[in-house]
Amino acid sequence: MSFATNLKDTPDPVAAAAGMTRQEVRASSALASVFALRMLGLFMLSPVFALYARGLEGGDNAVMVGLALGMFSLVQAFFQIPFGMASDRFGRKPVILIGLALFVAGALICAFAHSLLWIMIGRGIQGLGAISAAITALVADSTREQHRTKAMAMIGGSIGLTFALAMVLSPVMYQGMGMAAMFGLTAVLGIGAMALVKWIVPDVEAVKSERVPFRTVLMLPELMRLNAGVFVLHFAQMAMFVVLPAALVHVADIPVASHWKIYLPVMLVSFVAMLPAIFVGEKYGKMKPVFLGAIALLLVSQIGFWLGMQHGLLLITFLFVFFIAFNTLEASQPSLVSRLAPPAAKGAALGVYNTMQALGIAAGAASGGLLTQYVNSQAVFALCAGLTLIWLIIAASMPEIARRSKAAAQA
């Protein structure tokens, strides 16, 4: 049976190939909104948390402040795989709802906390709800392969725009309502996300197939390539943002309070700019050239930052190049994982993928700080360029990915 026949309101295969069905659009947009609501609350905390922490018991310890801020991602790294595997076994929506409930509970603990220790506990409980893998697996379940990257692009775009919006809102909200109320708002956003999952996200028939050993998922060569790739991508993202804000201030003469004026248009234009490549790659089954081209663009951006650190206009230009590459890879990689993973283990495969993403974030931030402190800022981009070159060489041997849905439609 074709996967498409499991989707309600799906037209015949020829008509369906022309575009996403209403069911696919509804599922993708709703799940992108779930991501956005969840991430908006998290992103709004980052720019002002260090200021708030100074007034808490234990907030005079910079290491503890950093640990409290990073606690969410640290715990997420350990729980992505268990939650992904649980979604394979018990269903996507129940696992997502449990994760969002933990997210809300942790936010409420933080809202009433009066010490850094309780903030860390609350952030850790939020991190327990590691549902990124379950959400992306549900996107994969809800869309046909020829439209899956578009659905993933909707999620990637929603996260990017949410980040830019949070940079604008965060200082204003902190001054106007305080951090406790912002944590409370985060809980409200989490409840809104739960309502979307419960009543708006369509139910999708589970794929019936034999269970797959986790070792098989972990050792599939094609998945290993993608897991290594997402580590490098987010390593580079975090490492460069250790350096870039200061460079925008000192080289481009843009004050920190105005950085959103750069990030927001760059995110918007780069998202639109990457869409034609995604659409053409999916339509003609040429995602490998699109994928390799995006990695090459990432390499160009890192070399550009490395050599152009003293020129403000070049910094902004290569930031735009970076985000075209980043948005394209953020959309295409989870889609490729869902295609290559065994049908009964998509959640587990995406759990590994998201774990490597979290580890890349942590390693990139740490390495960026160490290199900036003990070498110089250009060394950060030199390292990122070297890792990206290795990734490009590894990815070049990846075979072109056949579209299973074509064969399935003829079966």
Image (cartoon, grey):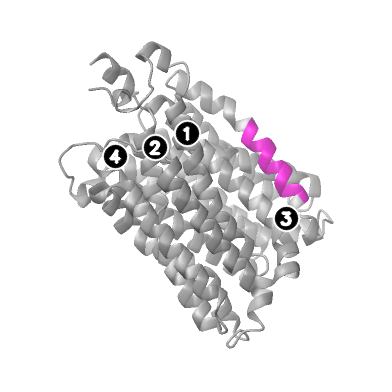
Residue 235 visible within the image: no
Q: Which residue is mark 2?
A: 202
Q: Are marks 1 and 3 in contact (CB under 8 Å)?
A: no
Residue where numbered disc 3 is placed: 168
Which disc, if any, is residue 341? Answer: 4
Relative vertical location of residue 371 with respect to residue 324 in this rendering, above or below: below
N-terminal label among 1 and 3: 1
Labels 4, 1: front one: 1
Magenta segment: 261-272
Q: Quadrant of residue 408?
A: top left
Name the kind of residue labelled 2 in the image.
Answer: Pro
- Decide if residue 379 is on the left or right side of residue 290: right
The kind of residue tagged 3 is Val
Which residue, as the protein is rendered here, is positioned at the far front? 199
Comparing labels 1 and 3, the label whose residue is closer to the camera: 1
Which residue position is annotated with label 1?
26
Callout 1 touching callout 2 (CB < 8 Å): yes
Position of 329 relative to 360 (above/below): above
Residue density around tag 4, few if under 14, some if 14–19, many if 20 or more, within 10 Å = many
Element class at badge 4: loop
Quadrant assignment for the C terminus: top left
Q: In the orientation shown, which residue stands out farthest toward the top?
A: 14
Q: Residue furthest right?
A: 253
For image coordinates 17% across by 37% down, the residue present is 209
Q: CA distance from mark 4 to mark 1?
A: 24 Å
Q: Are marks 2 and 4 in contact (CB under 8 Å)?
A: no
Tags 2 and 3 touching, CB below 8 Å: no
Please state if 253 lies on the left or on the right of 306 as rendered: right
